[in-house]
Each structure stands twice: as C-alpha cells, then as structure tokens.
Image (cartoon, rainbow, N blue to C red):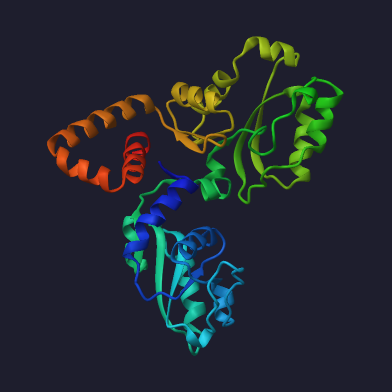
Amino acid sequence: MNYRSIADLSADIRQWIPTLPRDIDCVVAVPRSGLLAATHVALQLNLPLTTVDRFAQRATLEGGRRCPPRPTFDELEHVLVVDDSVCSGDTLTDARATIAAMDDSPAVSYGAVYATPAATDCVDTYARVLTTPRIFEWNVLHHPSLSNWLVDLDGVLCRDPLPEENDDGPKYREFIETVRPRVAPTQPIGTIVTCRLERYRDKTEQWLATHGIEYDRLVMMDYPSGEARRAAGKHAQYKATVYSESSATLFIESNQTQARRIARRSRKPVFCVDADCLFRPGYPTRVYQRGQRSVRTVRTNPHRYLRQFVADPVGFTRRAIDHIFRG
C-alpha cells in the first residue's frame, strides 16, 4: 500500500514544478482534494488560482495582497488544470466536459500530482506514478475502501478524553455525550475498534448516530472498569487480534506506540493519525535493508552523490531520508 502525506505532496510538487509548461498563467483546481495540490502549485509558480466552476464563469479567486495582479479572463493564454491524483480519469473527464462547453477557453493543459500507470495518458503532465492501493493523508477518512478498514474511535473520530474527564464515571459519560467529532467520514466505516468499555456502548452508538457516522460493526473492550482495563494493559494486543481475525486491509489508529505494535502483531499495515505515517509489517527490517542498499549505491559512484550534496545539502539529505524511511 502506497501512502503519501501532505509533506510528501509538497515535496513532490516542488520536483514537478520545473517540468511544467513555462507559459502557464493560471492554475485551475479540481475540487475538492485537487484544491490542496493546485494551491501548492499556484504558490510555487506565483500564479492566480481558480476552480473549474469559477473558471467556467470566467473568474479567478481573490489572491490577497501578496498575489500578483489578477489577469482578466481574456488575458489568459494557457491554464493548468490540477487534481491531486488520477486513477480512472472520471473526475478529470467531468472537468474537461465543463471546460469544453466554454466558447472562448484559453489553451488548457491537464495535470495530476499522482497517476496510476494506466492513467498516465489521462493527463498531459504528472509528478509521480503511484500504484494502487494507495492512501493520502488529506482524504484517508473519505477513502472508498473505508468500508473494509478498521478505525479507532478516540483520537481519530474524536479527541481523546482529558485526564480530568477520564474518571470512568459522570465526567467520562459527559465526554462521550458532548465531545465534538474531529472528522465525520463521508464513507461508511467497516469496523470501529475502541478501547471504550462495553458498558458505554449505548452512549457511544448514540453519539455516532447523532453525528452521522455510519459503520457496520462496533467492537468494544469487555472489562468491569477502566481501572481493570488499564491494569491489563492489552490495548494494542486487543486491537491487533481483532485486526488479524478480520479481512480488513488497513487499521487507522491514533497512538503511535499502539500503531507500531498493532502492525507488528497483526502483520498488516496501520495508518497512524498522530504521526501521519503508515506502519507496515517488517518496517524496521525494510528500513535497514534500504539503508544498506543506499550505502552500496553511494560507494559505486561517490563523486556523483557528493556533487548533489554540495549543490543542495538540505534537499539531498531530505531525499535520502525519504528514500530510506519511506521507500
């Protein structure tokens, strides 16, 4: 499973910028996740930004005092339509149809930061080929595969209770009833796996229903009290067991320590919300192996990599770390 964070997106766009057409004078975003990528591109190129619908209305977005003066629509000669990724090409097909219906559109190029191997022909330019399955930090809880995933509750769907709220009594019940959701997924969740106790099931189900969070199954811990649960200390083991016994292909966890342990025990990938990182089975071994391969590669041509380091020490170091730890 391929994972890209917002930091990865920014880095990939910076590497993409030099390959883009030089005469672009406006960036057009494909909502919604395409707005994130298009904003990065527009900032890097210091160009005005708009959306497909606004473009069809012959308008660009207000840019603020730091943005260069907005050109009129008639002054535009070449625009770049940007989405974050292209897989089937359906979203870009809709954008093409909207723009094709215009009588006086300027020249248009279509681009995506990430493209599957089969979709590279759907765009004129792309930053990186990324095979499926893949997940992105900015839309992981809106992914179509969410119905086949396991999701933690506290720390993911809502914040964790504060120490003073975690009394396993009236304050905790008030927390469950009134806490605001961190995110309301737009896709049904397969299974919610929480360390909350079974005795709080009714209030938890009511909270989920109140906030429109759909799911197939809710799995809760069965201990007589919070104290007994803490004494057992089997949070990660419990989640890993549920994960291992399921057909789910991803677990979304908030706590970094638990995420590592769940991945190790289940031998399946775990996305950690707090760390913005995908932990994979055998992760330490793969990091070591990639590091060893990188050392051997540098030894075969040390002068080449020394020149790259001297030319851009910060960028070279970042790319080396990214290669070793993310692959």
Residue that appears at 32% across and 64% down: 19
What is the quadrant of residue 229 in the picture?
Answer: top right
Residue that appears at 79% across and 38% down: 206
Furthest residue in direction right, as rendered: 170
Residue 48 at what x, y percent from top left? 52, 72
Taking the image as shown, residue 24 lies to the left or right of residue 296, namely: right
**Residue 62 position (above or below residue 173):** below
Residue 173 visible = yes
Furthest residue in direction left, as rendered: 300
Residue 256 at what x, y percent from top left? 54, 28
Q: Nearer the viewer, residue 128 or 79?
A: 79
What is the quadrant of residue 255 in the picture?
Answer: top right
Residue 129 at what x, y percent from top left? 33, 54
**Residue 185 position (above or below residue 43):** above
| Quadrant of image for the C terminus | top left
Taking the image as shown, residue 130 lies to the left or right of residue 187, namely: left
Residue that appears at 78% across and 44% down: 210
**Residue 25 position (above or below residue 87):** below
Q: Nearer the viewer, residue 303 or 3?
A: 303
